[in-house]
Image (spheres, rainbow, N blue to C red):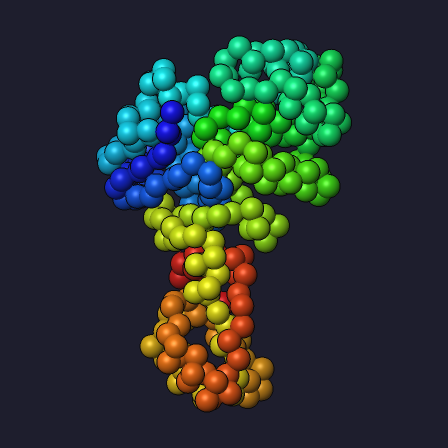
Amino acid sequence: MNLNVNMTNVSLKYKEFEALKNVSFSLEIGKTYGLIGRNGAGKTTLLSLLASFREPSSGTLEIGGKDPFDNKDIMPHINFIYEIDYSDEYEPVKSFFEFQERYRPNFDREYAEKLAARFKLPLDKPIKKLSSGMQSALNVTLGLASRSQITIFDEAYRGMDAPTRELFYKEVLDEQARNPRIMVLSTHLVSEMDYLFDHVLILDQGTLVINEPYDEIISRGVAITGESTEVDSFVKYKNQLSTQQLGNTKSVMIYGELSEKDHQLAERLGLEIGPVSLQELFIHLTKGGESE
Ligand SMILES: Nc1ncnc2c1ncn2[C@@H]1O[C@H](COP(=O)(O)OP(=O)(O)OP(=O)(O)O)[C@@H](O)[C@H]1O
């Protein structure tokens, strides 16, 4: 079953408030997508559409060429992992595994138990009694071991300490290599997780402002550093994201393709073209009217 995703001109309104505006993108099996955006940008709203928890107000969403909403053939292949309130959950971890085994067609019990051991999850303890980091580890265990064609992690790392998060990231890489699928990871920990992403979606106030392969974004974002007036003349007609000045030296972050001519000009002017991280680009691309 090929469950590639196509979202076309999708908007979603909560009453009068438009949380997603004309969003279009596609997702392909075998790729890991980073979904980033500031608080309230619309990440969870977008993911809840992908998971068919909601329907678009306008536009179309197709998964495997079909409308996924209430579609019993597609739903079991989509797994949306998000923070769940387990305060009333008296069942132990192993009962959850049994349930998943019945409901999820590709759930791998052996792998789930291996992960539980790695995350030090006690199989017999009621889930409500696990620490919040352990509950998150349980959530990601269910997501990874479900082997669902579309696996969505919405800030799934909450409560996990740094070594546990590292374990999770390693499993994301290993799983994607072993059992290719669509993985979508929404996160605020951009600099920690960017190496996982094949492709990046950046939402800004409900609008998809970046939908690019990770390598392309990184190659387009550069810092131009050198003598102030030379830098000014070089960046004059470019998309400037931020400026730093120290004495007569200036560094300007720009976003856009640099031509061969640009590279030659930079060299002639004695300007340095340096790399910029995804986190820096994200901060400046979604600044929206705030002053530096
Ligand atoms: N059920 C709802 N009713 C009305 N407005 C909502 C509802 N859910 C979300 N919103 C609004 O939609 C916008 C997007 O919210 P969403 O939760 O998708 O953002 P987010 O990017 O996931 O944010 P965060 O990073 O803080 O988790 C916000 O302005 C939020 O207040």
Q: Which of the 4 image quadrants contains residue 99?
A: top right
Query: Where residue 224 appears, x then y in whole percent?
Result: 49, 77
Does residue 126 appear to the left or right of 42 in the view shown?
right
Q: Is residue 132 visible?
A: no
Residue at the far front in the pictured view: 178
Depth check, front residue: 250 or 5: 5
Residue at the far left in the pictured view: 58
Query: Where residue 111 appears, x then y in whole percent?
Result: 64, 24
Does residue 195 appear to the left or right of 182 in the view shown?
right
* Residue at (68, 32) in percent of width and height: 133
Q: Is residue 273 above or below residue 26?
A: below
Depth check, front residue: 5 or 223: 5
Query: Where residue 290 appears, x then y in whole percent?
Result: 44, 62
Please count the marks in the image.
0
Q: Is residue 234 visible?
A: yes
Does residue 189 appear to the left or right of 68 in the view shown?
right
Q: Quadrant of the N terminus?
A: top left
Q: Is residue 132 above or below residue 245?
A: above
* Residue at (25, 34) in percent of width and height: 60
Q: Is residue 231 above or below residue 47?
A: below
Q: Which of the 4 image quadrants contains residue 265?
A: bottom left
* Residue at (68, 21) in percent of width and height: 113
Query: Where residue 253 appears, x then y in whole percent?
Result: 47, 71
Q: Is residue 24 above or below residue 78?
A: below
